[in-house]
Image: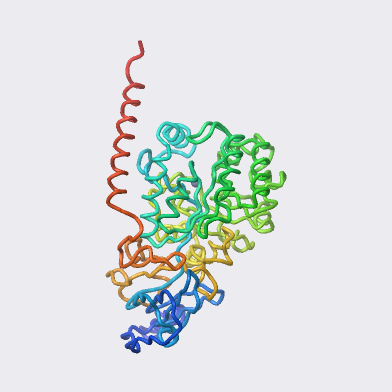
Amino acid sequence: MPDARRAGPIALLLAFAACSPPAPDNGPEPAPPPADTTGDPVDLVVEGRWVLTMDDADTILEHGAVAIDDGIIVAVGPARDIDARYAAAERLGGDNRVVLPGLINGHSHAPMTLLRGVADDLDLMTWLNAYIFPAEVEFVDPEFVRIGTELACWEMIRGGTTTFVDMYYFPDVIAEVVDSCGMRALISTTVIGQRSPDGEGAEQDIADGLEYVERWKGKHPRITPIFGPHANYTLNEQQLRATREAANQAGVPISIHLSESPFEVDYSKRTYGTTSIAFLDSIGFFDGTTTIGAHVVWPTEEEIPILAERKVGVVYNPTSNMKIASGVAPVAAMLRAGVRVGLGTDGAASNNDLDLWEEMRLAAFLQKVGRMDPTVLPASTVLRMATAGGAEAIGLGDTIGSLEPGKRADLIQVAFDDVHFVPVYDVVSHLVYVADEQDVATTVVDGRVLMRDGELLTIDTERVRREATELAARIQSALAERRAASSAPQP
Ligand SMILES: [Zn+2]
């Protein structure tokens, strides 16, 4: 770049052009051909000024379209060709819009939206043991979970997230909300070695979990029941082994907090004689169905190849890692080693939102400053982690994550209307470094439109807002009473 500056403004412009993808022409979209009612009938055509397929070649179509029928992508191509070939029952125009696969949130605790802001600015173990676990035992019931999940689905659909991997309590309730709101989810039945809102301990959690899996496995096109052993510091070796056996027996994946904090690594060394990932590998925890490991901030150099070999899907949660000061995950090293890495928000109590756009931006920034190297984790890599890479990490790479014929139709339109998108040199750069939840115009899951032009179609948002506000008021006054009681002079 110094050479270009010395050579003057024209050379500088060329230098910029050379290091960016081809600048899209900003001309008007060609007029669509007259509606062809003789084409093959399809349910839906979604058009875009730009269509990012996120296929292996990173194909970007200008003035493209996606044809969808019966929940499946049947064709992706130039809008003119798609319009000529298909007669769509519904057509979503693409002026100034970017079409891309729906975003994948690989780690969340959806109902914790109701605890957002209840306790901030604490370290992980204080936050969990002094605030979150006691509050959950006291307040979390099926009603809490229903309202919190609806609130989460509202935010996720609004922000263009189409799939999430959840870990919380009362998984049947979460699944019922996911069914009605239209999203896709892997929903854990949590296993934890202590009393929780829906169980007395790990043994009961596993038995209940097997029944829950039986109720949902293979019964719903968008819902995958999975096991969610909380962590290796809330479960002992026997309980971890038993959870893995149950998941294998049921044929469903596992999601677990993995190598999240220095506390966990120390605990693992003290308790098991080695670090988390090496210990879990030594007991065969990664053998069998897919393991989704949330966080993985502190893998040792020896542990990274284990993650690649065992095909453990790693979910990077930069906002939570920063807020709780868990650390900087070695994401570039994991990607280099062939580890599948996706992105997640973690729960709204440690984030405090479910915005994957912010997560993408912070994913890149935290890596850059953590390594003091601005070339680490470029925008295209981050966007892949939120889409096709995330799908692979959670074991759904053959089903979702890219816009290709045969895949399920999970996609979004981002409106490039706001001033912060002007001008457009590089669409991928804008999506990662500029876009926010509010820029998403359309969200489609399994071919069904869940949000059109910013309007939520499957959630009664006013009812959810009212119910969440009322429930939070009850939690707030109970917490205030408890604080008053604990600070009152003892008799
Ligand atoms: Zn978590």
Q: Quadrant of the C terminus?
A: top left
Q: Nearer the viewer, residue 127 or 211?
A: 211
Query: Total number of numbered labels?
Result: 0
Q: Nearer the viewer, residue 194 or 327?
A: 194
At horizontal 43% and vertical 86% (from top left) the residue drawn is: 39
At horizontal 36% and vertical 76% (from top left) the residue drawn is: 91
**Is 477 placed left or right of 244 in the picture?**
left
**Is 4 placed left or right of 477 in the picture?**
right
User: Where's residue 112, x and y in %?
Assistant: 41, 44
Identify whether 347 is placed above or below 385: above
Identify whether 161 is placed above or below 296: below
- Outermost residue to the top: 491
Residue 296 in view here: no
User: Where's residue 353, x and y in %?
Assistant: 38, 51
Q: Nearer the viewer, residue 448 or 347?
A: 448
Residue 279 in view here: yes
Rendered image quadrant of residue 204: top right
At horizontal 29% and vertical 37% (from top left) the residue drawn is: 473
User: Where's residue 420, x and y in %?
Assistant: 30, 68
What's the coloring here?
rainbow
Q: Quadrant of the N terminus?
A: bottom left
Identify whether 236 is placed above or below 59: above
User: Where's residue 465, x and y in %?
Assistant: 29, 48
